[in-house]
Image (cartoon, rainbow, N blue to C red):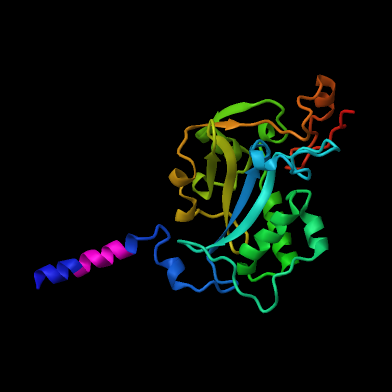
Amino acid sequence: MIGRITAVIVAVLVGAQLSPLGLDAAARSNTPGDFDYYTLVLSWSPTHCSEPEARNDHLQCRRRDGRRYAFVLHGLWPQYERGYPERCRTRKRPYVPRPVIDSMLDIMPSRRLVIHEYRKHGTCSGLKPAAYYEKARKLFRSITIPKRYINPFESQFVSRGDLIADFLDVNPALDRDMMAVSCRGSGNRLREIRFCFSKDGAPRACGPNENQRSLCRALRLFVPPVRSTAREPDSPAQRQKAVPRSPLPEPRVIPSPR
């Protein structure tokens, strides 16, 4: 009898640990609006543009007008305290109108990504596309980007701790437990930074979904420089013209070489 009881206890404990997402996600049913907090995900565009699959990405990585992107909006993800909902069922087909798509391209330079993010994550927010992306833009604007990451023309190496400290210095409302850094690839390239917000849009501590050890264990990160076309590097004169005058995380426009 004791052996059977022990076996049952072990089975319960193992079952609770089978998934890193815990029981929260399994017990909830992807109902729109039923989530605990948001994760705002900012991607480091140069890392994407340095990858082979970005070779034909003319909108973000190989523009002819010289526009460059540093941190861009990847998405706004509804989260459970453990786990997350996705592709929530809505009464109507999750269609993203063309004007909404076009309105996001300045900070989210991929039409396919705008559509994908709403279908996978936005449907779980309980918001229609226009309202969802309005909220995403508002939270994106609420994050101040440190000067060294606005429009860097040179490669940088930075410790993960210094990267977080740089953001905390210019975002006094944030604490370390409200953000997490993701890296990948050769040299542990900076991939993205995640920021956590309440459903009302106030900064809050992240949950286990943003576990730092699983997102990036490296202590030192490679931060590739911004780029716009295949004709790199630009001349010093062109770089001087492209020096940003505003600390806002906007893409920068420079003259295109002929």
- Residue 91 lies, with reference to residue 195, above or below; the image says below
Residue 166 in which image quadrant: top right
Q: In this rendering, would 180 be left or right of 213?
A: right
Q: In this rendering, would 34 be left or right of 56?
A: left
Q: Residue at horizontal 39%, vertical 60%? A: 19
Q: Position of residue 40 (x, y in %)?
A: 61, 53
14 in the magenta segment: yes
Q: Residue at horizontal 74%, vertical 42%? A: 56
Outermost residue to the top: 236
The magenta span reads 8-15
**Residue 11 visible to an observer of this rendering:** yes
Q: Position of residue 237 (x, y in %)?
A: 84, 21
Of residues 175 and 151, the one nearer the viewer is: 151
Q: Residue at horizontal 48%, vertical 72%? A: 28
Q: Position of residue 36 (x, y in %)?
A: 53, 65
Q: In this rendering, would 149 be left or right of 68?
A: left
- Residue 17 lies, with reference to residue 153, above or below; the image says below
Q: Position of residue 216 (x, y in %)?
A: 49, 41
Of residues 132 and 49, the one nearer the viewer is: 49
Outermost residue to the left: 1
Outermost residue to the bottom: 91
Q: Residue at horizontal 45%, vertical 46%? A: 214
Name the quarter where the N terminus is drawn.
bottom left
Count all numbered tags in the image, as a single digit.
Answer: 0
- Residue 229 lies, with reference to residue 24, above or below; the image says above
Outermost residue to the right: 258
**Residue 121 visible to an observer of this rendering:** no
- Residue 78 lies, with reference to residue 156, above or below; the image says below
Secondary structure mostly seen in the magenta stretch: helix
168 in the magenta segment: no
Name the quarter where the C terminus is drawn.
top right
